[in-house]
Amino acid sequence: MNLFTPWENVENYANAGKKKSERSFGRLFVLAILAGMTIALGGATAATATHALANVSLQRLISGLLFPFGLGIVVLTGSELFTGNCLITISVLEKKTTWQKMLYNLLVVYLGNFVGALLVAVGCAYFGQFDASAGGLAVQAIRTAIAKCSISFPNGLVLGILCNVLVSAGVMVSLTGKDAAGRIMGAYIPVALFVICGFEHCVANMYYVPAGLFAASVPEYAQLAVEAGLDLSALSWGNFFLKNLLPVTIGNIIGGAGLGAALWYGHKAN
């Protein structure tokens, strides 16, 4: 068969997670920046394609068709994504690495992903990409950021769990493939589902919310947002970190690490 069995896939990831947990800081951080940029660019692409659409269902459908290519690129380039790396629980449970090394990996990758996403957000907000539709793209970026800064903690937590069950499943399914097409499709379908459902992904939000914050700092964009009837009072770095990033990150960890533990138990535990 042109794919690995589930047992082989879990075994393969146990070995891959070991290598991830042993990468030097420099390589890990650079690969994490690349993954953060890739996910952010997927978000920027989806937002650009849908910002002028009034139909929410159509917005989500088109975003679901476009955004997942970001994870496909992450998988094929071997870059380091925080949400996917929550699966290193498999390596820990297989005794290929330790909890301490896993946590170190997640911390470095999280920071690198944030840097990569911020770089894309800065580029889009301050260098003309948000000028599309006479600033309509900037208004939509601000609208998205406001919505994400207004989410409740329980909602962010649960939507984060559901999101990373799917994203981590996408990573595992992609790794069952033995060719590029199989790996891309394996990553594509679960991520499309999370985007269409509107679940919360911390690395994607590292782009979406800062992009809206940066756009709101541009007077022309801020004026357009006010004219569109948006209330900017909820849009702040404090609300981003406490109301969105914190619960979503915790939820993503639970979802990804939990899926990894379940797959290990189902296929490898003695």
Image (cartoon, rainbow, N blue to C red):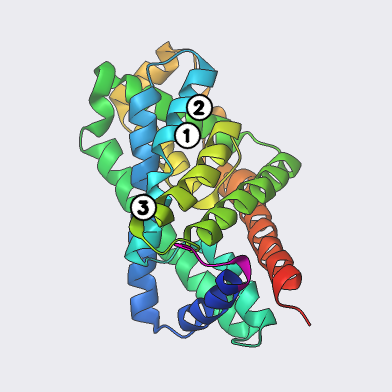
- Predominant SS of the magenta segment: loop
Which mark, by number, is residue 60?
A: 2
* The furthest residue to the left: 127
Residue 59 screen position, x and y as percent? 47, 23
Name the residue: 32% across, 63% down.
Answer: 77
Q: CA distance from mark 3 to mark 2?
A: 24 Å
Q: Residue furthest right?
A: 270
Specify the label residue 181 is tagged with.
Answer: 3
Give the class, few, some or many, for how many residues have Cα within 10 Å of label 2's Cα (few <14, many ≥20): many
For discs 3 and 1, the disc positioned in front in the rendered view: 3
Picture quarter with the C terminus: bottom right
* Spot occupied by residue 249 in the image (x, y as percentages of width and height): 61, 55
**Residue at image point 40% right, 81% down:** 25
The residue carrying mark 1 is 64
Q: Please determine whether, in this image, residue 30 is positioned above or below residue 53.
A: below
Q: Label 1 is placed on what type of residue? A: Gly
| Residue 6 inside the magenta-drawn segment | yes
Asked whether residue 231 appears in the rendered view, the answer is yes
**Residue 82 on image: x %, y %:** 51, 62
Mark 3 residue element: helix
* Kind of residue at badge 3: Ala
Q: Does the residue at mark 2 contact the one at mark 1 (Cβ under 8 Å)?
A: yes
Horizontal relation, residue 31 to residue 188: left or right = left
> Quick one: 155 or 90, which is closer to the camera?
90
Labels 3 and 2: the sequence-earlier one: 2
Looking at the image, do the residues carrying marks 3 and 2 touch, with CB atoms under 8 Å apart? no
